[in-house]
Image (cartoon, helix red, strand yellow):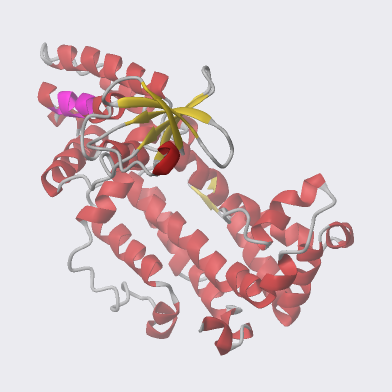
Amino acid sequence: MRIIEYISDRKARVVDENNKNPGILLIKGKPNERKNGIIKAWVIQYDRNQGLYLYANAYFGKHDISQGLTERYVGILRKMFDHPEALVDTDISVLKGMCNRCLKKDQWDWFTTYKYLGYPVHPVLREFVADALVQRNKLRTGDYVGLPEFRRKYQFMLSSILFHLTEELEDENLYVDIPIPDFDQIQWKKMSYASRRNLKIAERIFKKSSLFSLMHYFVTLEQEFDDHFIQPFIDLHRNKLSQTSCHGVRYQRTHDVLVGKSRLTLGAVNFLRAHIKSNNACAKSEAVRMFSDFLELKRDAFSELCSLIAETRVNGIPLPQLRNGLAHGDVDVTVHIDGAAFDNLRSCLLDPPVQIFSRILSNSLQDSVPAKLDS
């Protein structure tokens, strides 16, 4: 981007040379400015009201959260969700500071923290800081009444960062090559390293916080479904898919997943099942038609698997709705999550008769892709 003018030693007005977007550059250290005021920077925020992008020129903000602070955050957040009566006023102060660093952008890990919180908009961050101040003062007088509502209000942010930090904290001694109990050794090896790691983490942390171990299962489910059905199709037809288009709005979501433009989520699975059987969908999207042909003899097994994912319920909630509710902090969903929910979800994924993971792995289409494509 090009520097237009310096506002101060630490700020400058800039414009993106590629798309002409105006913005403000936050400067750390001495800018590595090339000829004509050109400088490399990265986007950290967009101000919709002013139509301005906020950029940074250094790695400042992107550093990892320290081990000590990670352990402190995780300990406080686990108390918040599992044992709120054990919280003290300084715990709330730490959470307040966690969001304050995202507003002030004055710490080496502020952007990492912001990302782990789920990129909340700044008004929400400011409201969190204000509400945390109220809760901290109440705890000093022994008043815990407002904590459940505080937790529900900011469930999305707090669950998001706990999910990310727990992954980092639980990474040692996972022994991902050894299957979890009752998991077939051969099928275990078919799973990606990330999926095996997620399952190990889910099993390990359940006793500490059952609410968040569920997300590890859902992340693994989406990853394995994508790895064994969608990605083999994309790998085999990559050149053709780049030239396909969709002529029906109702099929666009499925089309985008199949050409690699959108990430697969559980919510898209049932659409996949319906569209591969629809003549109209196959006519409107060449990608849908090609995927239907790609499934061949496994089309019925694939459809049955999609139906299981869409219709299986845990504590009365369909899996896609449960996954989205957890990810977005939907109180109507999270209120139903308890130890029984973990056991039920685990059973649906691993145990007969449903065995969703086993069905994915035994019907995998990875072998449909020639080995030379892996090189």
Q: For residue 94: magenta?
A: yes
Depicted 105 relative to depicted 178: above or below: above
Q: Nearer the viewer, residue 211 or 338?
A: 211
Residue 281 visible: yes
Q: For residue 148: magenta?
A: no
Q: Nearer the viewer, residue 111 or 99?
A: 111
Residue stretch rendered in magenta on the structure? 91-97
Q: Is residue 206 left or right of residue 18?
A: left
Residue 72 placement (x, y as % from top left):
14, 40
Q: Nearer the viewer, residue 119 or 92?
A: 119
Depicted 142 relative to depicted 168: above or below: above
Residue 8 placement (x, y as % from top left):
29, 20
Q: Residue at x 76, y 58 (%)?
A: 274
Q: Quadrant of residue 302?
A: bottom right
Q: Is residue 19 left or right of residue 104?
A: right
Q: Residue at x 40, y 78 (%)?
A: 188
Secondary structure of the magenta portion, mostly?
helix
Residue 176 placement (x, y as % from top left):
29, 73
Seen as rendered, the residue at the extreme bottom is: 371
Residue 40 placement (x, y as % from top left):
39, 44
Residue 356 visible: no
Q: Quadrant of residue 152?
A: top left
Q: Residue at x 22, y 15 (%)?
A: 133
